[in-house]
Image: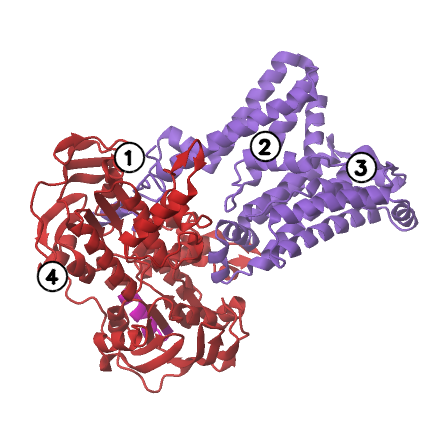
Amino acid sequence: MTHQREAVTDGEKPDAGPDSGVVQVPLSGSGKARTGAAGFLLGSSVGRNLGLVVALFVLCLVGVATAGQQFASVDNGLTILRLASVIGVVSVGMTFVITGGGIDLSVGAIVALASVWSTTLATQSLARGNHWTLIILVALIVGMGCGLVNGLLIAYGRVVPFIATLAMLAAARGLAEIIAQRRTQIVSVPGFTDFFRHDVLGIPLLVIIFAVVAAIGWLVLNRTTFGRRTFAVGGNPEAARLAGINVQRHTVALYVIVGLCCGIAAVMIVARTTTGSSTHGTLYELDAIAAVVIGGTLLSGGRGTIVGTVLGVLIFTTLSNVFTQNNLSSSAQSVAKGLIIVVAVLLQQRLAARSNNGST
Amino acid sequence: MSVPEGAPLLEMSGIVKTFPGVRALDGVDLVVRPGEVHCLLGQNGAGKSTLIKVLAGAHRPDEGSIRWAGDPVSLSTPDTSIALGISTIYQELDLVAGLTVAENIFLGHEMSRGGLVRRGETRRKATALLARLGHQEIRVDREVGTLPASGQQIVSMARALSHDTRLIVMDEPSAALDQQEVQTLFRVIRDLTTQGVAVVYISHRLEEIRQVGDRVTVLKDGRTVATDLAAKDTPTAELIRLMTGRDIEYVFPQRTPPDSSAATLLEVENLSLNKVFADVSFTVAAGEIVGLAGLVGSGRSEILESVYGARRPNGGTVRVDGNRLRAGSVGAAVKAGIGLAPEERKSQGLLLDQPIYQNITVSSMGRFARAGFLKGSSERASATEWAKALDVRPAGVERPVRTLSGGNQQKVVLARWLLRDCRVLLLDEPTRGVDVGARSEIYAAIRSLADRGMAVVVVSSEVEEVLGLADRVLVVREGRIVHSGPATEIDEHRVLDLVMEGSAA
């Protein structure tokens, strides 16, 4: 009886802000009050991901209906996954930064710089002379280095993430152009190219890399102290600081992680195209942010989902595949992408409002 | 002084508002006459906030009738309420920090011609409104973000008056104000009522209601349980009985007799922060509660934050157990066993959308992790244990902290530091936003922490709280400690004297 009463007090917060136009729904029982089937499906994270799965499924149905066997073949499926893997790895990194309350606009430029730096004549001859994995090492170091610069500027220089990474976007791509002299650099390190021609049980190595990165990302975000701190830093940095979390150091770590992901993506793109180029990764920042956001990660930080991000990437990649199969222009793809982003975010806001206060 | 007679301005009767799963309002009656200060009393969850949202047009009642100046009305949207002359000043002020005072006052109903704001007229009218509130000294071109809390409160009231207001609802207007500012607020309220404006005043502080109120309506469990009580002379015991349905006689826990052999845990020596406080020295022994009394702006919160390392002091030392802490490092303070329950619980203390258990374990996660991986079950078990020990209600550690009442949120913060085995606990305004019934629980919890051997420092604007809870009291005025002694040897008047001395001029 008393507990029932106490539950009701939730409805009236003593200092509800003026903007909380609606009173919170008092829940009786730990969060299980909205167990209406629909409420559960839409409100829980499982439900949200299910929504994305349904969207992906519908997209596939459209693909089969319009392109038939051409779409529904194993080869095409692998093509979609291969295309998804590079941007997917970047998006996993982006999920961390956004969950931690930041944003990284420089991912595409970092991918370009890392791809160029790891394929210069100097790097390649060094790699031929020693070991082909040097190419990978250089790409990862360049990626993490750029991330470190971003992180230090943001955490200790107190530059707004948007601005700091915008500057990196310009600078990193410019540097990539200078190094490559605007030429495409062909990779001719046999060990490297041979290695990435492998596949595992018919699944291309790139796809395996994406899966591994996503799995590690999920574990780190959901099962480690680092992940928990990421949610805390993104949700309420001041409270995190006063709880004893080193918010600045954590922020730097988040940007290094996304930088590392960019380095990995650069290796993947170099492997796929056997080139390094300052035009690699163009507009990756937008694709990654879009995938993260439609996946259900809050742009304001504090809530993030790797599963959602992966589904978001798959949705976008499948979409462009369906369009390509039907010989529709890339301009039409862009319009469709824009629509999907808006619809997804509108839906999420409705759901968030519902799970927060239920009275609307 | 006398209760104004005459036709009621507002009559609400039988108001019912249900949300899925709960009847937030279950038959509320409220009658407000012109020119009176009508106080609304009730515990958290009694329905006060829902009721004022109905009044503001933010919620549509399911049943019941509302009459305004005798005519039935329907307050379906905020616009309707404003048009009738109802203004609401919420507890957390809804001002735009980057706009000027004048712009804030006329926000949403700017005076314009052909789409251009008439700046001269806006400023003139804003000045006139501030003058009407007795605050000519607030410049209308000043950015609102640069004003102190009390100034912002005045701007909010000016905004309310900028509409043709006949009823102002104030939700805990004194929460962010110090004693002196509260007196100014009361003077403004009295001026307004003599002009015929009615005020609905919500506060947890009974003494304020006695000072400024005319009549009292008490809500409990979404119902009106008493109305038309005289604010001045209804006995406190009676009011508390109506609010809680039980009698509270003694809210402060019994003091544990001081143990003179107890080790000194916290030593603060000559701590200074530029232009805020200087030469602050005190010690706290294990098992002791030290209270810091002072006005808002006296430097008391900054002292706590500097001890905790959240601010970097210019000079002085902080020692825990004799070991000097690195200045300005929260990490060092936490490692040494200091915990802080900050003043702004929601913005500084809690991760509102995260579950209770994560808020409890956030400062001791390492303990539940192996190689960085969290062991969810032992984490939950420990959090549950401490949540139970402090009686966080409702039980169950999975629900987001946002859904808890203020008192239970505070218990979550306390549980966090308990779990960490913290040895020095700094509490800044531990009962802000916590209702009367739940306060005694917080007091009891704090005392039991001290009895476990913690050294506790409590900062509070409420002198009564400091005197009732602490073993020793330090009085802070203008950044200096002006008095230090046992709590039992000083009374409220003396503390107020010390606190205000010099600032009266």
Mark sitting earlier along the chain (2/3): 3
**Relative side of A119 to B254, left or right:** right
Colour applied to chain A = purple
Q: Which residue is mark 4?
A: B237
Q: Which residue is mark 1?
A: B20
Task: Give the image location of residue B67, x and y in percent.
Answer: 15, 34
Task: Tell me: residue A104, above or below residue B147.
Answer: above
Question: Residue shown at 76%/42% (left/top)?
Answer: A173
Which segment did they paint magenta? B443-456
Question: Residue shown at 8%/40% (left/top)?
Answer: B7
Question: Residue shown at 56%/29% (left/top)?
Answer: A341
**Foreground: B502 or B237?**
B502
The answer to whether residue A116 of the structure is visible from this angle is: yes
**Which amino acid does the dot numbered 3 rest on?**
Ala
Q: Which residue is mark 3?
A: A271
Label 2, label 1: how many angstroms apart (C-alpha)? 33 Å
Numbered circle sitting on residue A312:
2
**The numbered mark 4 sits on a residue in which chain?**
B
> Secondary structure beneath disc 3?
helix
Task: Give the image location of residue B100, x and y in percent.
Answer: 43, 49
